[in-house]
Image (tube, grey):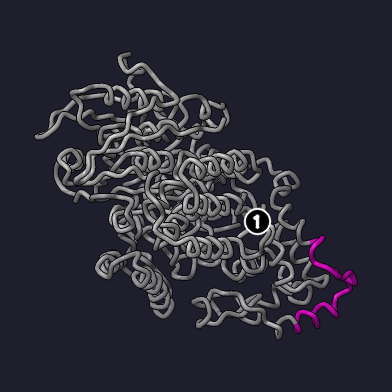
């Protein structure tokens, strides 16, 4: 049902103490009743100038805003408002963070829509006639940040993160977040924060206007955070500080600026104009426009209408399925607490202390960065010094880019690269807790490397191969300890992509599997345990996809005519652009190893014979100019496509596609059909 926000009582402000009679909130709980269980801990504490009620969210591990939490939080703020001895309220989270947001499991059950709904709770905090301050540590995500924005001020501990990631679930912030954030930080920042879902540090949030004060790291941080919040309350009471009801603010931009900003954001978010999975991001733009041009109550109605539409959209249903699936794959029976694997998993994080990586190419460099970013000491090994120096230069270039963009300081870059050691000898990996091999796909080369690792590495070291297709057992059999050998297949670019396939061989121990799963989690990636078969799971799915793209190529379509409609469908890139990014030489070497290499019949083999491996050689299915898009923007190459036309003329196939749309729009479906079409008992 549509909500009708109550009128709000004015808070004491600097040199102002005007008050309006407070109306009853729509959802009302008897403030004299006992608290609703331990969901929110209610305590009274006297600070130097005032007695304050502290409402502590207690729903481990992330203080998700379940129905019980919402009830108890609403009851707590009403109880504090009714108590004449309480002069203000502090809202904080128990444990490691403020709140991770809504309880996603309640979406399916319908409990998320049971009273009190989160928008009512946020309004109750804002309606309180006494100053309410959010004391944020750890994560304040989604609904958790919306609760904080419902408070009259926010103080955040250094190291906290604030985000509204609902766009990643195909929805938008639905508890007034799309209306309050633009009023606090402006339209441009609000659109950027909500359509990206990216986390903000407290310093950036403070500069925007979202956070009022940052409490520096150090001893007794929790106590100093509470004192900072109490100081805000005391300042409001004596008139020296102004506390704001964010719904009463107006966006700082002019209406013309708002119109232009929203239009430009939509153009960037949806350049093809066909939505393509961008429904929630575009809806956020509409909600922000409403916040900037309409009263809060009207804007809130727009927000509620949009979230109701998005919640039942195919995009949101799919993204929520993915959310639970990514967490479900981590629940592995043999790694349960109380099992040998479970005990080993607890030790997984220590495996990122000293790590070896063999191979300084594109994949090896990305793996090195992944480990460096979580504090590991990494030793990078290559066979030739020239390749080693080239790989180190590529790694440094990525960190230089981060410094240039303000994501990292020069001092931090120096510290990170200071943990990178290099060598031309596998013998220098003797002290490593784990080694990841990332050389090109050649079984003989990999078996030789693992035989050397068997001799060089200490007992119990994890011996991981990044192979994308080769038989894990054949690699493990080159050692005397196959139980320590496992596949750890990263996807390119390894420092960006979240997925890692953890490939168990026939003799891989459960302890090894557990430790690699824990190590993968430490890398902030999604580790999926899979069986040992040709292509594992990811490349097994991609095989039919890329095969079909190859058939279309042979039958008359150039790469842009195939990639374009695939992007329009909603995928980030098409199969040929993906090949250029990952490196066309990877599958080229696989085909050579399998004996299927044939440049006379397969233009992909002819392409690599020309040295066109993709972005890393500035030429693949497209050409790349270092001066355009940092050398990553695919540019059509008419000379190559002329060679492709000549190649087609020598092939027996005569079918030609007069119009790419009917065929290419079905291409992404091969990704979803492949698991059904190509079953494998070992998966």
Q: Is residue 18 above or below residue 544?
A: above
Residue bearing mark 1:
275
Considering every residue shown, the one lying at the far left of the view is 48
Left/right placement of residue 281 relative to residue 182 reads right
Q: Quarter of the image for the N terminus: give it.
A: top right
The residue that appears at 31% across and 24% down in the rendered structure is: 76
Is 316 contained in the magenta span?
no
Q: Quarter of the image for the C terminus: give it.
A: top right
Image location of residue 104, percent across then percent down: 50, 35
Magenta span of residues: 642-663
Is 649 contained in the magenta span?
yes
The residue that appears at 36% across and 51% down in the rendered structure is: 184
Q: Is residue 617 above or below residue 554?
A: below
The residue that appears at 62% across and 63% down in the rendered structure is: 573
Left/right placement of residue 211 relative to residue 248 reads left
Left/right placement of residue 376 relative to residue 316 reads left
Who is closer to the viewer here, 59 or 623? Answer: 59
Image location of residue 363, percent across then percent down: 49, 65
Who is closer to the viewer here, 492 or 1? Answer: 1
The answer to whether residue 225 shows anywhere in this view is no
How many residues crowd mark 1 within 10 Å: few (<14), some (14–19), many (20+)? some
Image quadrant of residue 403? bottom left
Image location of residue 257, percent across then percent down: 48, 64
């Amino acid at each position: 049902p549509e909500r009708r926000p109550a009128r709000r009582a004015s808070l004491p402000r600097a040199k102002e103490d005007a008050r309006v009679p407070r109306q009853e909130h729509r959802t009302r709980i008897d403030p004299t009743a006992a608290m609703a269980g331990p969901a929110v801990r209610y305590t009274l504490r006297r600070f130097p100038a005032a007695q304050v009620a502290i409402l502590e969210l207690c729903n481990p591990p992330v203080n998700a805003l379940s129905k019980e939490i919402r009830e108890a939080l609403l009851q707590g703020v009403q109880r504090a408002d009714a108590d004449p001895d309480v002069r203000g309220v502090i809202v904080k989270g128990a444990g490691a963070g403020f709140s991770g947001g809504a309880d996603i499991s309640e979406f399916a059950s319908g409990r998320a829509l049971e009273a009190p709904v989160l928008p009512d709770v946020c309004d109750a905090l804002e309606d309180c006639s006494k100053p309410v301050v959010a004391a944020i540590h750890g994560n304040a995500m989604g609904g958790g940040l919306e609760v904080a924005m419902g408070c009259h001020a926010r103080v955040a501990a250094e190291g906290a993160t604030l985000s509204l990631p609902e766009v990643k679930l195909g929805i938008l912030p639905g508890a007034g977040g799309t209306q309050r954030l633009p009023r606090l930080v402006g339209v441009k920042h609000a659109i950027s924060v909500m359509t990206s879902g990216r986390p903000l540090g407290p310093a950036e949030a403070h500069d925007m206007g979202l956070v009022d004060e940052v409490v520096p790291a150090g001893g007794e941080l929790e106590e100093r955070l509470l004192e900072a919040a109490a100081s805000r309350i005391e300042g409001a009471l004596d008139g020296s500080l102004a506390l704001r009801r964010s719904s009463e603010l107006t966006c700082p931009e002019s209406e013309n600026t708002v119109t232009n900003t929203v239009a430009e954001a939509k153009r960037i978010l949806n350049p093809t104009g066909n939505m393509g999975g961008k429904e929630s991001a575009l809806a956020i733009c509409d909600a922000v426009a409403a916040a900037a041009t309409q009263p809060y109550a009207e804007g809130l109605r727009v927000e509620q209408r949009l979230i109701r539409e998005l919640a039942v959209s195919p995009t949101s249903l799919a993204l929520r399925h993915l959310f639970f699936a990514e967490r479900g794959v981590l629940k592995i029976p043999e790694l349960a607490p109380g099992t040998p694997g479970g005990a080993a998993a607890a030790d997984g994080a220590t495996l990122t202390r000293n790590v070896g990586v063999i191979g300084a190419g594109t994949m090896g460099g990305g793996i090195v960065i992944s480990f460096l970013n979580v504090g590991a000491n990494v030793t990078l090994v290559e066979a030739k010094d020239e390749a080693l120096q080239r790989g180190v230069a590529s790694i440094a270039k990525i960190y230089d880019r981060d410094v240039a963009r303000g994501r990292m300081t020069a001092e931090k870059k120096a510290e990170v690269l200071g943990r990178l050691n290099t060598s031309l000898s596998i013998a220098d990996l003797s002290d490593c807790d784990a080694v990841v091999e990332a050389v090109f796909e050649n079984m003989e080369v990999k078996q030789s490397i693992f035989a050397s690792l068997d001799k060089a590495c200490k007992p119990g070291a994890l011996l991981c191969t990044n192979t994308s297709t080769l038989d894990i057992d054949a690699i493990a059999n080159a050692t005397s300890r196959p139980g320590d050998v496992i596949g750890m297949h990263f996807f390119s670019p390894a420092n960006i992509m979240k997925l890692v396939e953890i490939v168990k061989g026939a003799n891989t121990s459960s302890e090894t599997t557990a430790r690699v799963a824990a190590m993968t989690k430490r890398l902030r990636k999604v580790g999926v345990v899979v069986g040992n078969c040709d292509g594992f799971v990811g490349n097994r799915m991609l095989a039919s996809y890329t095969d079909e793209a190859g058939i279309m190529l042979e039958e008359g379509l150039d790469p842009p005519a195939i990639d374009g409609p695939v992007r329009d469908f909603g995928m980030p890139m098409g199969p040929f652009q993906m090949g250029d990014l990952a490196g066309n030489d990877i599958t080229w070497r696989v085909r050579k190893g399998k004996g299927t290499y044939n440049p006379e019949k397969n233009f992909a083999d002819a392409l690599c014979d020309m040295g066109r491996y993709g972005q890393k050689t500035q030429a693949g299915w497209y050409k790349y100019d270092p001066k355009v898009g940092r050398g990553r923007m695919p540019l059509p190459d008419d000379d190559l496509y002329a060679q492709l036309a000549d190649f087609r003329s020598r092939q027996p196939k005569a079918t030609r596609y007069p119009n790419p749309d009917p065929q290419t729009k079905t291409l992404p479906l091969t990704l979803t059909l492949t698991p059904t079409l190509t079953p494998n008992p070992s998966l």
